[in-house]
Image (cartoon, rainbow, N blue to C red):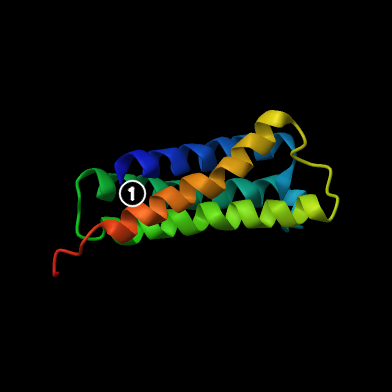
Amino acid sequence: MLIPYIAVATLLVLHQIDAVYYREWEMFLLPGGYLSYMVFNLLAFPFVLFGLNQVSIRHKNAKLWSFFLAALGLITFLIHTVFFLFGDGRFELLGSKIMIYLCLPASLWLGLKAFQIRNSSD
């Protein structure tokens, strides 16, 4: 699960960096603007990194962390797809779209790998 976890985490981190350029906090009407966006990332990144640690040491909760990150990647893909369908002009650069679109197969890959891992209690 480590390689697909790293793939999804990398896409999500790169997307969050790219999202600063597009002022993503305005898309979601976040009160506090940039500051609340940064606080969100300050809280979210440690979870992603902690999950990476759990997967890398093959902790008994690694499967759960992988499902969490896979869901986050799928949600990112779905939310931005909806924005695209409704004509939002952000994330129009090719690299931005590629990162968002790759969240779908990478997250499905991670979810499938996590699903295939047997629990230690099995």
Q: Is residue 109 above or below residue 7?
A: below
Viewer-proximal residue, 23 or 73? Answer: 73
Q: Position of residue 58 (x, y in %)?
A: 20, 50
Q: Nearer the viewer, residue 120 or 116?
A: 116
Q: Is residue 74 visible?
A: yes
Seen in the picture, residue 31 relative to 109 is either above or below; the reply is below
Residue sitting at 74 percent across and 57 percent down? 82
Give SS at disc 1: helix
Instruction: Residue at 52%, 51% (x, y): give it.
Output: 73
Q: Nearer the viewer, residue 47 or 5?
A: 5
Is residue 16 in view? no
Coordinates of residue 19 in the picture (x, y in percent): 67, 40
Rendering quarter of residue 49: top left
Toward the left, the furthest residue is 121
Give neighbour class at mark 1: few <14, some 14-19, many 20+ (Cα, 10 Å). few
Horizontal and vertical percent position of residue 76: 60, 52
Seen at 38% across and 55% down, the residue is 112
Tell whether 32 sits left or right of 107.
right
The kind of residue tagged 1 is: Phe
Q: Which residue is identified by label 1?
A: 50
* Horizontal relation, residue 71 to residue 20: left or right: left
Residue 112 shown left or right of residue 102 in the figure:
left
Instruction: Indicate the position of residue 53 as horizontal and vertical percent values.
Output: 28, 45
Q: How many marks can you see?
A: 1
User: For the point 14% across and 69% down, which residue is it?
Assistant: 122
